[in-house]
């Protein structure tokens, strides 16, 4: 056995899937049904994050039924970030995928992913980042919005950042689209804040400066379930947790590399992703509308300029960045128009 508890005479799994789980009894079985049955090429790590319902028993049952591929980490509640930290720490696969316990993966797409990872290993050509599509599985809506990257990434070949084209405003490489090399994530020094939601922004941001090889696989792998009233992306919930969203925003700013230290297209993309987070923070503060939150909105943009003038300039260079950063009542009116458009296009909750 090695330090992670894996057999030393067995090849490492191609993929470690981390499933952060807190009071997930209503959803965990659905997620797990999409994650087992791939033999030892897929390692599933259920992190029971201090659940008080039947999640611990369900997790142990899955491990008992699939001892060759399912492991369980039981821990005191540390939040989504703490659960991801635990999973990253014990993962033995060459690549990492995060699947929240209320989401699931498309099985045919999993096989396509494994084919790519297997070929990369056999050719001894390390792949830092594999990008796939994700689908908004909105509760009660028959039409499913699929986020693809055909306009951003050429499909079927390994590229560098110089070949990455511009994303649209509604398009970014969120955690659901990423499969990262495990050693790269660890080498990035990523440690997510505990008891904090929205850390997926950091997971999808901090490791990127170490990424050198990228491949896009045009399959609809990740099924992102949205629409529950208690979900973290519900508007009222986001407003109630705005302090956590702002904390993540500040950490994203601090993780921005100096311009010129990374490929130009990478810096442009990281500024784009930071811009999206700034827009979300701004809109939620405006939707709240309290004097405290309106002041926090102005402070957000002031702090960005003070902490990282280069990033501030890059974020506000685009039309969306300029409009959303406008202070006072005109900025509020413009921001809310943009939010309504985003709701209609993307089906946000």
Image (tube, rainbow, N blue to C red):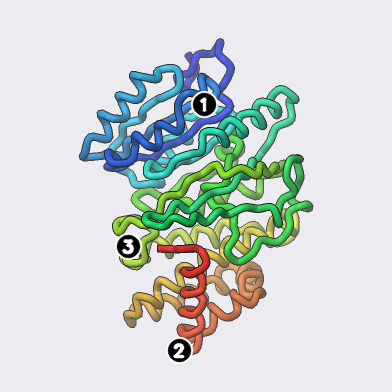
Q: Are marks 3 and 1 in contact (CB under 8 Å)?
A: no
Label count reads: 3
Question: In x, y percent, where is residue 279?
Answer: 51, 70
Mark 3 vs mark 2, CA separation in Å: 24 Å
Q: Which residue is mark 1?
A: 42
Q: Secondary structure beneath disc 3? A: helix
Q: Nearer the viewer, residue 8 or 34?
A: 34
Which residue is depicted at the point 73% across and 58% down? Answer: 165
In this view, the residue in front, 170 or 200, is: 170
If you read the primary sequence from the N terminus, does the residue marked by circle 3 or circle 1 appear first?
1
Labelled pair 1, 2 in contact (Cβ < 8 Å): no
Q: Which of the 4 image quarters holds residue 64? A: top left
**Residue visible at 64% across and 41% down?**
130
Query: Counting residues from the N terminus, which is met first, the one under dot 3 or under dot 2?
Result: 3
Residue identified by numbered label 3: 237
Element assignment for label 2: helix
Q: Which mark is residue 329?
A: 2
């Amino acid at each position: 056995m090695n330090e992670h508890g894996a057999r030393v005479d067995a090849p490492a799994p191609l993929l470690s899937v981390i499933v952060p789980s807190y009071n997930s009894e209503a959803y965990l079985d659905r997620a797990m049904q999409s994650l087992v049955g791939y033999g030892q090429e897929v390692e599933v790590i259920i992190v029971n994050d201090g659940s008080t319902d039947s999640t611990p028993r369900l997790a142990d049952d899955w491990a008992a039924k699939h001892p060759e591929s399912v492991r369980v980490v039981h821990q005191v509640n540390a939040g989504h970030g703490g659960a991801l930290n635990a999973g990253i720490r014990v993962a033995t696969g060459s690549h990492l995928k995060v699947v929240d316990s209320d989401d699931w993966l498309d099985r045919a797409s999993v096989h396509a992913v494994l084919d790519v990872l297997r070929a990369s290993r056999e050719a001894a050509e390390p792949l830092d980042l594999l990008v796939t599509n994700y689908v908004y599985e909105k509760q009660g809506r028959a039409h499913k919005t699929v986020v693809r990257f055909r306009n951003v990434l050429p499909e079927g070949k390994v590229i560098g950042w110089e070949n990455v084209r511009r994303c649209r405003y509604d398009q970014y490489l969120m955690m659901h689209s990423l499969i990262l090399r495990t050693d790269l994530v660890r080498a990035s020094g990523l440690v997510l804040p505990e008891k904090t939601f929205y850390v997926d922004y950091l997971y999808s941001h901090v490791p990127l400066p170490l990424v050198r090889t990228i491949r896009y696989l045009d399959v609809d792998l990740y099924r992102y379930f949205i629409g529950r009233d208690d979900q973290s992306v519900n508007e009222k919930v986001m407003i109630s947790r705005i302090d956590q969203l702002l904390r993540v925003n500040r950490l994203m700013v601090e993780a921005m590399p100096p311009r010129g230290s990374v490929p130009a297209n990478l810096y442009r993309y990281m500024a784009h992703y930071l811009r999206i987070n700034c827009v979300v923070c701004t809109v939620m503060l405006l939707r709240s509308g309290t004097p405290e939150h309106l002041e926090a909105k102005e402070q957000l943009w002031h702090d960005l300029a003070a902490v990282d003038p280069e990033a501030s300039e890059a974020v506000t260079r685009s039309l969306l960045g300029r409009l959303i950063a406008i202070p006072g009542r005109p900025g509020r009116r413009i921001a809310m128009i943009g939010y309504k458009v985003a709701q209609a296009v993307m089906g946000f909750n």
